[in-house]
Image (cartoon, grey):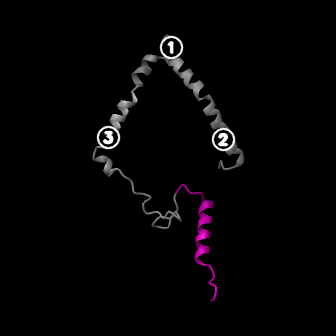
Amino acid sequence: MAKSLRSKWKRKIASRERKKNAPKELARLKHILTQEGSSDVFMTDVKDIATVVPPEKLNEKMEIERDSPHDIVGKMDTDNNRNKKTLLDQHGQYPGWMNPRQRKKLRKQRKNKNNKPRTPK
């Protein structure tokens, strides 16, 4: 589902609206968070849950985690055995994200290429 032109258009317009309204929403959130006397928002609870961390500290933490030996083990080799041209893996399966129509088209191309009649010399 959600492959029709109408739904694509609606998604496109919705993403434009999100981009347009994002600064307003951010300003509104900041305004709400700065109000300490508001009765409907309990800022003390929110301050305990959310903490603001400068980006430099996050970068330092990421560098420390990269140096750990677990990072080397954590590499995934799922698509290393996939043919780049046909997108088939070692078992002849297409990736899960591929549309069935695309699969059918590639399968047809592959079979036509293999079964071309040879011209006599």
Q: How far is the residue under mark 3 from the one under mark 1?
A: 37 Å
Q: Position of residue 118 (x, y in %)?
A: 62, 84
Residue range (magenta): 96-121
Q: Report the residue that reaches farthest toward the right.
A: 6
Q: Where is residue 7 in the image (x, y as percent from the top left)?
A: 68, 44
Quadrant housing residue 68:
top left
Per the rendering, the mark at residue 35 is 1
Q: Report the residue that reaches farthest toward the top.
A: 37
Kindly identify which residue carries mark 3. 65
Please give the name of the residue rendered at 72% of the width and 45% of the height, measured from the top-left corner: 6
- Secondary element type, mark 1: loop
Upstream in sequence: badge 3 or badge 1: 1
Kindly identify which residue carries mark 2. 12
Q: Report the residue that reaches farthest toward the front.
A: 121
Q: How far is the residue under mark 2 from the one under mark 3?
A: 38 Å
Per the rendering, the mark at residue 76 is none
- Secondary element type, mark 3: helix
Q: Nearer the viewer, residue 95 or 113?
A: 113
